[in-house]
Image (cartoon, rainbow, N blue to C red):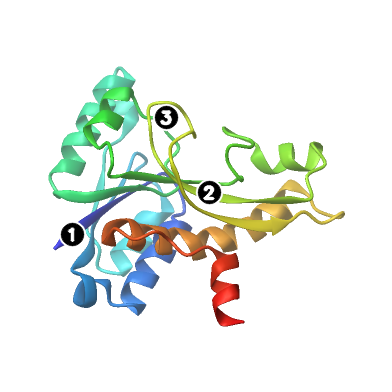
Amino acid sequence: MKNIVILISGGGSNMAAIARTAEQQDWAGRHGIRIAAVVSNRPDAGGLALARERGIPTAVVDHRAYPTREAFDAALAEGVEAHDPALVVLAGFMRILTPGFVERFAGRLLNIHPSLLPAFPGLDTHQRAIDAGCKVAGCTVHEVTAELDVGPILEQAVVAVLPCDTAETLAARVLTQEHEIYPRAILAHLLGRRPVCDQERQAGSA
């Protein structure tokens, strides 16, 4: 069985989308892939309850209990490693990981970022896209490397920026696409396949 460990800090909507897709597509039965645990750095993260409702084991490694980022990441790594992960998935995990953590899980650490990387790495992506006059925005699934938001891109989805958009309305439409592409990219990565982008999917059905 290939184990996935998902790291969250908040409501866990991407985590829930991954878990829902895994159930609907029977990843465990068809591919030998399961979500082994959901781990949060915040004990009050709403996503922990969502995971428990689906019968997924949860754990908390509270970053406030550790004097340094390195100490927290070392404890987090030990907690993650206990589940023998084939893949570690960042799903709204609001901590910048140390190079030591990234190196430990190199090649099996994914993130989703709410922009069309390499455009707008970091925070406030939606407002920055609007302020720059972008006609499109979107989201990117990528491998995590020591440098923030520059790892190899696995899949992207594009969303039009509307004249009436605020950062909040754009974020909501992008989030819908995140829920679509993240599970798809995770499965493809674990199966050693290249994800099929939306344009290729549409061409194949034409």
Q: Which residue is mark 2?
A: 140
Dot placed on the residue nearer the N-terminal end, 1 or 2:
1
- Which part of the image, by quadrant, shows the C terminus? bottom right
Mark 1, secondary structure of its residue: strand
Mark 3, secondary structure of its residue: loop
Seen as rendered, the residue at the extreme right is: 163
Q: Which residue is mark 1?
A: 2
How far, Cα to Cα, is label 3 from label 1? 26 Å
Q: Which residue is mark 3?
A: 96
Q: Is residue 115 above or below residue 147?
A: below
The residue located at (22%, 71%) in the rendering is 31
Q: Amino acid at mark 3?
A: Ile
Of 204 and 83, which appears nearest the observer?
204
Q: Position of residue 8 (x, y in %)?
A: 38, 47
Seen as rendered, the residue at the extreme bottom is: 206
Quarter assignment of residue 100? top left
Q: Amino acid at mark 1?
A: Lys
Answer with left or right where residue 52 lies relative to residue 32.
Answer: right
Dot placed on the residue nearer the N-terminal end, 3 or 2:
3
Q: Within 10 angstroms of label 1, few (less than 14), some, or many (20 or more) residues? A: some
Answer with left or right where residue 138 lies relative to residue 57.
Answer: right
How far, Cα to Cα, is label 3 from label 2? 17 Å
